[in-house]
Image: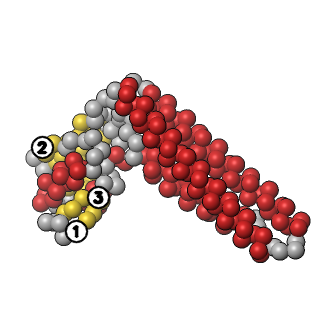
Amino acid sequence: MDPVATTTKEKLQKVLDVLKDDLATIRTGRATPSLVENIVVSAYGGSAKLKVMELATIGVMDNQTLVITPYDASVTHDLQKGIEAASAGLNPIIDGNVLRISIPPLSTERRQELIKAMKYKLENGRVMIRQVRHEMMEDMKKDYEGREDDIKRLEKEIQRLVDETSETIEEWGKQKEEELLQI
């Protein structure tokens, strides 16, 4: 594979990785660690800003309940405050040395809001893909100046990679929408 195509593929994979993490933050009515793992919490009296996954283990008790077990019991209240402040609509309750979060069922109205947010995130992913395509086309035209056959071949290869990535995004969107619409 040509270096231009390899670089394009790597950049498109990074876009997919970012989008996948972004989509994981959208609640589907089921308990999953991704709902809280990247929430930043001010811990140890505000001296450290750490993600929940850096401060505790996150487990799924059942479809509707997350259990967060802090590595250090002194940060339990910090975790509770940080998760509440994250505006994720989650209310952790301290139960001994663990936090329990019950995931409330989604209303039809809330499901539609989440679908709208998901579509916005998907569109941002498409924009990033177009930016990668534009950037790679510009670089390739500079690198292969005067070599029209190579330019045409690489333009087709870059477009093929972009199309494959776009199809992946569309599939993810359909799957996420199905998850959101399940009751």
Residue 8 sits in which quadrant?
A: bottom right
Q: Which residue is situated farthest in the left direction here?
A: 96
Of the two numbered discs 3 and 2 in the rendering, the one whose residue sits closer to the viewer: 3
Say which element carries label 3: strand
Dot placed on the residue nearer the N-terminal end, 1 or 2: 1
Is disc 1 surrounded by few (<14), some (14 to 19) or many (20+) residues within 10 Å?
Answer: few
Is disc 2 surrounded by few (<14), some (14 to 19) or many (20+) residues within 10 Å?
Answer: few
Residue beneath the point at 55% across and 60% down = 14
Q: Is residue 35 left or right of residue 167?
A: left
Can residue 6 be seen at all in this image of the molecule?
no
Q: Which residue is mark 1?
A: 48
Say which element carries label 2: strand
Dot placed on the residue nearer the N-terminal end, 1 or 3: 3
Say which element carries label 1: strand
Residue 30, compared with residue 154, is above or below; it is above
Q: Which residue is mark 2?
A: 95
Residue 102, compared with residue 21, is above or below; it is above
For the C terminus, which image quadrant? top left
Q: Which residue is mark 3?
A: 40
